Amino acid sequence: MAIFRVWISAALLSVLVFVSLSPSLAEEEKAAPAEAEPSFVLTLDHSNFSDTVAKYPFVVVEFYAPWCGHCMKLAPEYEKAASILSKSDPPVVLAKVDANEAANKELASKYEIKGYPTLKILRNGGEIIQEYNGPRQADGIIEYLKKQAGPASALIKSTEDAENLIDDKKIYIVGIFQEFSGEKFENYLKVADKLRSDYDFGHTSEAKLLPRGDPHAKLPVVRLFKPFDELVVDFEDFNVDALEHFIESASMPVVATFDKDPSNHPFLMKFFNSPNSKAMLFLNFSSENFGAFKSKLHETAEEYKEKSISFLIGDLDASQGAFQYFGLKDDQAPLIIIQENDGKKYLHPNLSPDQIAPWVKEYMNGNLKPHRKSEPTPEVNNEPVKIVVADSLQEVVLDSGKNVLLEFYAPWCGHCKKLAPILDEVAISFQNDADVIIAKMDATANDVPSEFDVQGYPTLYFSSASGKLLQYDSDRTAEDIINFVKTNRDVIKLPESPESPDSHDSAKDEL
């Protein structure tokens, strides 16, 4: 399942597979290996990035962090590919940017870098930006990029061409035209060029050369081949937006499958990249009633195919990362959970096949109560750094009327472990100040509200007594954190006491 690492930028990916399948956030800080000389990979930064990219029609850029284990693993493969591709005609340029460097943070933000390594394809001097969705080994990188650097659509002149290009296990799109000219053909090539990093495209003048579909179809037509559902779909609208929408929607299974079969991985990527809410049914695929569950889920998915919800069926054995993230137990399966992009979740454990459709209908009608994963609220919470859980966050942090510095951490995170004694020192410095709370929450064991943008660990937020929310991104020394709290805190006024105005004024002066 290595394909599901942090280079996939889908929001929900961080919900289901991010925890168990993207350990780059869990990497301990490591020294960067010495770079081999000479290097065929261009080293870019904020000062030379734009000028360098503008020189080339096709550049691949790796955004990396020196401490990232996956980046270290990719480095020799990327270098080997760069040395070979530099000799191709035309040359294919490979480059890299240290996105962890403070001076390059703005550049990483511009290209929406959420994890490492992330590779981007930049075309036409950087005017077109596409995701790199290819292999991570040198031979695969070379093959993928040679194809990406070539024509967006391959000409199919024979049945042999079609057999070599159209794979029963992947999406393939073919435009069938009477002649390769005119607005419709040009629109097809525009879409092919825009989506080429995600799909393979071809074009032909003879439908009979293709393995499936109507050999006498009215031309022009776009034919999409896929390894699921109806296997082949034709589309006759050559408006660019309509054609792009057709390809994106038709290439997604009505129900995606989450198991250990690598051939399902590309469709899972599309599932998680979709902006829709995600309905996920988890059960043991070897159970005797698996067929009934699959059938009922498919019927339900067909009913809502045009709605903003996507469906997945997941094997219990392959879904332990999801169960860990959601705080679920195996004995709750079969279960269905719906995840929205704002973080809300809805859960139905131990359901039967006949309960799927009614429950989804209740969700679509807005009648379900969200499910929240939370550790138990601690009965004793007397350490300097207070423990916050999902069930107590609103009360302790957002509605407390106090100034709260909250750390979101992961138990395995090396940087969090280094920060722990520093936060203890900060908390002790404020131990006589009842208006300030230093707290922490295990973000792997508790749901993080949408108010907090937690992309990595540790992430620190400050909530002032008046409700002002700030993310802390300065140096992680006790002195800097203490100064930040003092600078941004609100002074809490004591209630007026008519019986003793003098003492009240004195108290305010002390504050």
Image: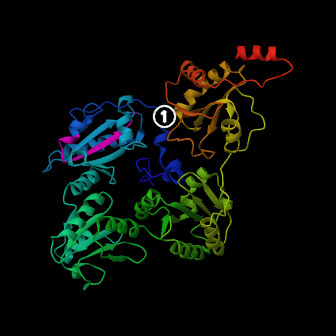
Q: Quadrant of residue 323?
A: bottom right
Q: Quadrant of residue 192?
A: bottom left
Q: Secondary structure at mark 1?
A: loop
User: Which is more toward the observer, 242 or 144?
Assistant: 242
The residue lying furthest to the right in this view is: 499
Residue 72 appears in the picture as rendered:
no
The residue lying furthest to the left in this view is: 89
Q: Position of residue 92 (x, y in %)?
A: 19, 47
For the rendered model, the colour scheme is rainbow
Write down the residue under mark 1.
Answer: 28
Question: Compared with residue 401, is residue 18 higher up or lower down, i.e. above or below?
Answer: below
Q: Is residue 265 magenta?
A: no
Question: Compared with residue 15, is residue 309 higher up or lower down, i.e. above or below?
Answer: below
Question: Compared with residue 203, is residue 136 higher up or lower down, i.e. above or below?
Answer: above
User: Which is more toward the observer, 170 or 28?
Assistant: 170
Q: Position of residue 133 (x, y in %)?
A: 34, 54
Q: Is residue 382 left or right of residue 362?
A: right
Q: Give the magenta part as a residue range.
A: 53-66
Q: Position of residue 283 (x, y in %)?
A: 60, 65
Q: Position of residue 35 (x, y in %)?
A: 29, 32
Q: Is residue 66 left or right of residue 390?
A: left
Q: Is residue 63 magenta?
A: yes
The residue lying furthest to the bottom in this view is: 216
Q: Is residue 433 left or right of residue 284?
A: right
Identify the image quadrant of the C terminus: top right
- Residue appearing at x 65%, y 59% in the figure: 330
Residue 203 appears in the picture as rendered:
yes
Query: Could you tell me the amino acid type at mark 1?
Result: Glu
